[in-house]
Amino acid sequence: MALPTWSKSGVTTVTFSRGDSYPRPLEGQEGQLVAESEAGTVRVATLHAVIRVYTMNFSGPTRLPTADYDAMRTFLLNTLVNLSANTFTWTDSDSTARTVRYMDGLSQFSPSSSGFYQGNILLREEL
């Protein structure tokens, strides 16, 4: 398995020194409204494609060393990424590259033991 990376032109690439927990939870949200009329007719309005949100779990044996946490934080706060404002490329442990947007989690990271941080990062895939 490859190590996960985050990359964006003009920003130093982050290569995590260990993978996140696997299998990775995937939350999909359908973009449809469904209603049934009194006569039993079903009407469906498609609002958008499925939204895919990935959780990168860094806890237990996949805790982040301080250097990885600092690199991740610096990457997300860089003006070219600017947390959720802009997309970047996430290449996961299976070497699958996805265009994603940071959604949440950085502020909930906490030190777990000497030199390690734990927490979850939510990434939304841009389709």
Image (cartoon, helix red, strand yellow):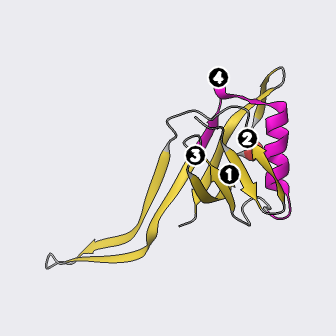
In this orientation, which residue lies closer to the viewer: 12 or 28? 12
Q: Is residue 45 left or right of residue 94?
A: left
Mark pair 3, 4: CA separation: 21 Å
Q: Amino acid at mark 1?
A: Asp
In this orientation, which residue lies closer to the viewer: 108 or 48? 48
Residue 59, percent from left and from top: 65, 29
User: From the viewer's perspective, is the residue at label 1 or at label 3 nearer?
Assistant: 3
Mark pair 4, 1: CA separation: 22 Å
Residue 30, percent from left and from top: 41, 63
Which element carries disc 4, helix, strand or loop? helix
Which element carries disc 2, helix, strand or loop? helix
Q: Amino acid at mark 2?
A: Gln
User: From the viewer's perspective, is the residue at label 2 or at label 4 nearer?
Assistant: 4
Residue under label 3: 95
Find out whether residue 119 is within the magenta segment. no
Any mark on residue 58, and which?
A: none
Q: Which residues are magenta?
A: 55-80
Any mark on residue 108, and which?
A: 2
Residue at image coords 63%, 59%:
100
Which quadrant would residue 82 be assigned to in this image?
A: bottom right
Residue under label 4: 61
User: From the viewer's perspective, is the residue at label 3 or at label 4 nearer?
Assistant: 3
CB under 8 Å between discs 2 and 1: yes
Residue at image coords 78%, 63%:
9
Please report whichever mark, 2 or 3, sits nearer to the chain's N-terminal start. Answer: 3
Any mark on residue 104, and which?
A: 1
Mark pair 2, 3: CA separation: 27 Å
- Crowd class of label 1 (few under 14; some 14 to 19; many from 20; radius 10 Å): some
